[in-house]
Amino acid sequence: MGKLFDLDSPVMRALGRMGDLLIMNMLVIICCIPVITAGAAFTGMHYVFLKMMRDEEGYLVRGFFKSFKQNFKQATIIWLGMLAVFAIYVIDIIIFGQSGISFPGVLVAAFFAMGILLLLVAMYVFPLLARFDNTIRNTLRNAVIVSFANLPKTLLMAFFYALPLIIGYFSVYSYIFIFLFGVSAPAYGAAWLYSNIFKKYEPATEQVSDMDFSVDVNVERREEETDGKTE
């Protein structure tokens, strides 16, 4: 019985991880209240979760705010751009629904396919920003490439993110659990998937200090530039 409550026992490790997810969930919710800071909050969360997946984690709160500060400018620009795009998309849906006009099926399918594309890409933007040093343009481009190059895992990630909504729809008693873990738990599950995906784009050898990531995901482009200089 005593071993059950040892600090290294599976039960205690699971409880400790649940505590980490609870803290992270509250951090993200609080940092999302101003709305404009939500992008940096999501980036900080994914930064910490990537560290957890690779057993490189340090201080949870310190790591979160370090990434929050370092990526604030890029994350905010991307976040505000995403908000604008989604706002336009929702407005278009409302207009289409209230216009009474019968649109061609191909147009409707293309419209909803675009919405799905935006959602799939959005799942990778902040993890990529947390993991790699890159421009905003290349981060968005890489999000498109990675999402479709790993479509089965991308769809599973989408399921993780949708799960709290599905559970909440069928049970109002789950709202408290959704409030406590509804943001961090799906993101943690997603990190379990994209952590291995990102390894394919990382250098074979990399010096990583505690809570410090700095890698360029555009390996092919960097190699082309190097070849050009040597010619």
Image (cartoon, rainbow, N blue to C red):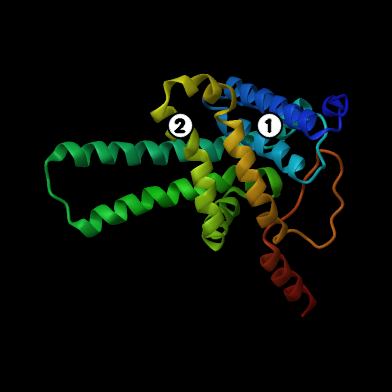
- Look at 64% across and 39% down and name the residue there: 188
Residue 63 against residue 129 in the figure, above or below: above
Q: Quadrant of residue 51?
A: top right
Residue 167: assigned label = 2
Q: Depth-wise, is mark 2 or mark 1 nearer the camera?
A: 2
State the CA–CA distance, disc 2 to disc 1.
30 Å
Query: Which amino acid does the dot numbered 1 rest on?
Result: Phe
Quadrant of the image containing the N terminus: top right
Whether residue 65 is visible: no
Residue 60 placement (x, y as % from top left) = 76, 29
Looking at this view, is 68 or 6 the one in front?
6
Question: Is 43 left or right of 112, judged from the image as shown?
Answer: right
Looking at this view, is 167 or 68 the one in front?
167
- Look at 37% across and 36% down and name the residue there: 87
Residue 169 against residue 113 in the figure, above or below: above
Residue 158 against residue 91 in the figure, above or below: below
Residue 71 placement (x, y as % from top left) = 67, 37
Residue 78 placement (x, y as % from top left) = 54, 41
Q: Quadrant of residue 44?
A: top right
Secondary structure beneath label 2:
helix
Quadrant of the image containing the C terminus: bottom right
Crowd band around label 1 with a 10 angstrom C-alpha radius: few (<14), some (14–19), many (20+)? many
Secondary structure beneath label 1:
helix
Question: Is 50 left or right of 90, judged from the image as shown?
Answer: right
Label 1: which residue?
A: 68
